[in-house]
């Protein structure tokens, strides 16, 4: 099998203790643009952060010095990057959140028609008050051209007993205007969190949802995201952590990346290790070829992005040093040939 390689592309340090929630877009000349949440005010979700970026001209083997892609314009931070290459216009769309308080987190989009050299003014997507969550590498474009931004929402994220719901925001004009799905999705306990969406071969949409129920839950849409079915268990074990789903363009199979573990009663349902992948050839009904990406009892791994380029999968995810003197969360880059997910290790 051809080579795989990885590196801590944004290592954390005492003055920059968290680098997380990244995504990659391939530029027209083949260079890779990576952006992530760069926390300079601590490791908590409400700590000060900007969005930083690096560029690679050799497929991710080396990277430029980091630079600021989006200054911190929030009272707390800006964070959580998604990129999308819009098919009709060819523009790069750059999505990110602006966080002001526990009841004020909204998402914005900026567009570039010159390969990320310059960006349009920010356009606010979410219009309703509250705390919106669009995780990194979550925005998808359907075969019809509609753009789907799956989000979860809470009126006030840390209020005791508050339950999170999931929905989607929709755009039919290349990201220039947005409307919210008619229905919201609920789950027990803390609710339906950090959704991700993939389009199935029959045109319907599959949403996967983070829950506290010991497994991933799912919802379906048969009208391109306007309405969604009631959520139900997916039959895939998982802690309270995000999972990533996408379709491999060269094979047509679905790829799932998640933490295959659950410890009832533990915080977040257990530590976020191992990080594994699996494939589905039947549109998510069953999964096979489970492979371990990371497995270390003293570390956690989560918030994965997946970008396909040529015949490789380019991943980013954070690596949490759980027992360090102060919390450190590094951003790791990993490049794998697509065939890696199909290989069965010896033994």
Image: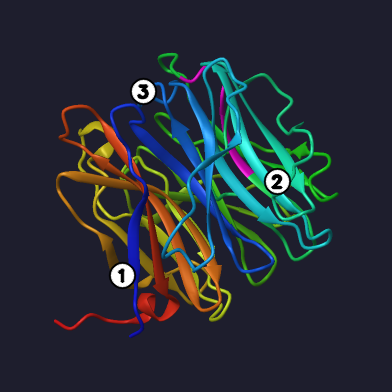
> In terms of secondary structure, where does tag 2 sit?
loop
Of tags 2 and 1, the one toward the viewer is 1
Question: Circles 2 and 3: CB distance less than 8 Å?
Answer: no
> In terms of secondary structure, where does tag 1 sit?
strand
**Upstream in the sequence, badge 2 or badge 1?**
2
**Upstream in the sequence, badge 2 or badge 3?**
3
Q: Position of residue 158 (x, y in %)?
A: 43, 17
Observer-nearest of 145 and 193: 145
Q: Position of residue 226 (x, y in %)?
A: 74, 46
Observer-nearest of 8 and 296: 8
How many residues crowd mark 2 within 10 Å: few (<14), some (14–19), many (20+)?
some
Q: Which residue matches tag 1?
A: 290
Q: Is residue 173 part of the magenta span, yes or no?
A: no
Q: Is residue 156 part of the magenta span, yes or no?
A: yes
- Using the image, tell me which numbered label, if any, was put on residue 42: 3
Observer-nearest of 320 and 132: 320
Q: What are the residue bounds of the magenta stretch?
A: 150-157
Question: Circles 2 and 1: CB distance less than 8 Å?
Answer: no
- Name above or below for residue 106 compared with residue 135: above
Observer-nearest of 200 and 252: 252
**Quadrant the N terminus occupies:** bottom left
**Quadrant the C terminus occupies:** bottom left
- Mark-to-mark CA distance, 2 and 1: 32 Å
Image quadrant of residue 10?
Answer: top left
How many residues crowd mark 1 within 10 Å: few (<14), some (14–19), many (20+)?
some
Q: Is residue 117 visible?
A: yes
Residue at position x 48%, y 74% in the image? 312
- Name above or below for residue 134 compared with residue 206: above
Residue at position x 20%, y 42% in the image? 263
Q: Taking 107 as reference, is 302 left or right?
A: left
- Name above or below for residue 243 compared with residue 253: above
């Amino acid at each position: 099998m051809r080579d795989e390689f990885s590196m801590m592309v944004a290592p954390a340090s005492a003055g920059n203790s968290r680098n997380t929630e990244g995504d990659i877009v391939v530029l027209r000349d083949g260079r890779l643009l990576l952006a992530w949440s760069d926390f300079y005010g601590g490791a908590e979700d409400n700590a000060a952060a900007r969005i930083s970026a690096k560029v690679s001209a050799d497929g991710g083997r080396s990277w430029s010095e980091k630079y600021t892609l989006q200054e911190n314009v929030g009272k707390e931070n800006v964070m959580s990057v998604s990129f999308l290459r819009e098919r009709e216009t060819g523009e790069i769309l750059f999505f990110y959140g602006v966080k002001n308080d526990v009841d004020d987190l909204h998402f914005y989009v900026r567009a570039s028609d010159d390969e990320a050299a310059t960006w349009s003014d920010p356009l606010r997507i979410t219009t309703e008050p509250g705390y919106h969550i669009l995780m990194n590498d979550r925005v998808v474009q359907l075969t019809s051209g509609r753009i789907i931004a799956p989000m979860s929402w809470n009126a006030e994220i840390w209020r005791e007993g508050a339950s999170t719901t999931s929905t989607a925001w929709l755009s039919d004009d290349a990201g220039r205007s947005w409307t919210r799905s008619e229905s919201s999705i609920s789950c027990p306990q803390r609710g339906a969190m950090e959704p991700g969406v993939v389009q199935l071969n029959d045109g319907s949409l599959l949403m996967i949802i983070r829950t506290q129920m010991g497994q991933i839950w799912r919802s379906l849409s048969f009208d391109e995201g306007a309405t969604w079915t009631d959520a139900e268990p997916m039959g895939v074990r998982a802690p309270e952590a995000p999972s990533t789903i996408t379709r491999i363009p060269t094979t047509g199979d679905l790829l799932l990346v998640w933490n295959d573990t659950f410890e009832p009663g533990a915080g977040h349902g257990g530590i976020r290790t191992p990080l594994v992948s699996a494939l589905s050839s039947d549109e998510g009904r069953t999964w096979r070829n489970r492979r371990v990406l990371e497995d270390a009892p003293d570390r956690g791994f989560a918030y994965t992005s997946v970008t396909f380029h040529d015949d490789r999968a380019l991943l980013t995810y954070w690596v949490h040093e759980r027992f360090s003197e102060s919390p450190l969360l590094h951003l790791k880059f990993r490049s794998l040939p697509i065939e890696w997910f199909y290989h069965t290790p010896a033994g």
